[in-house]
Image: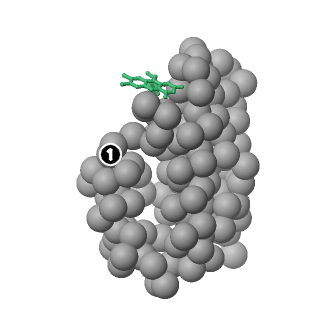
Amino acid sequence: MLEHVLAGAGAPGLESVHVHSRPALEADAADVLAADGVVLGTPANLGYMSGALKHFFDTTYNECLGTTASLPYGMFVHGESDTAGALLAIEKIATGLDWRLAQPPRSSIGPLTESALDQCWELGAAMAAGLTT
Ligand SMILES: Cc1cc2nc3c(=O)[nH]c(=O)nc-3n(C[C@H](O)[C@H](O)[C@H](O)COP(=O)(O)O)c2cc1C
């Protein structure tokens, strides 16, 4: 899914948007503060986001609070049965940060289909297009 998000964000015509991909365990508040938008991706684990993405929020929340208001964000989640808890948890945290959901969340359940991957491409492209000036 990530590869397709990145491919969409790098589509022809979007060259002015610089895209940086960070594993959740390596991303920090400076990455967010330097960004004009973020896309969050995670598997659904135990009805929630991954521990890695939760750790990202745990370690960046206070620094981002009040300094990243209105940041456009998107998200994509992959699960085997139910991604609702992960999507809701991310949305709650992002709402606490006053981030703005810029694109509909992309959720895929079960084996990844062409259509799900196309949706990820569109997510990346739409997020990047929204940041062009
Ligand atoms: C410990 C564990 C908990 C999981 N919990 C959920 C879950 O709550 N909901 C769900 O849809 N899938 C759950 N899964 C399945 C994973 O989300 C699935 O393996 C994931 O989609 C893999 O994504 P990826 O291959 O894109 O990383 C769980 C898997 C593991 C190992």
- Residue 18 horizontal/vertical position (percent): 49, 63
> Closer to the camera, 52 or 45?
45
Is 133 left, or right, of 79 in this rendering? right
Q: Residue at x 60, y 48 (%)?
A: 88
Tell me if residue 80 comes above or below residue 84 in the rendering: above
Residue 82 position by quadrant: top right
- Residue 127 horizontal/vertical position (percent): 65, 57
Under mark 1, the amino acid is Ala
Q: Looking at the image, can residue 49 be seen?
A: yes
Tell me if residue 45 comes above or below residue 75 in the rendering: above
Q: Looking at the image, can residue 12 be seen?
A: no
> Closer to the camera, 40 or 2?
40
Q: Residue at x 55, y 63 (%)?
A: 94
Tell me if residue 63 comes above or below residue 105 in the rendering: below
Element type at mark 1 = helix
Residue at mark 1: C-beta within 8 A of ligand 1: no
Residue at the disc numbered 1? 52
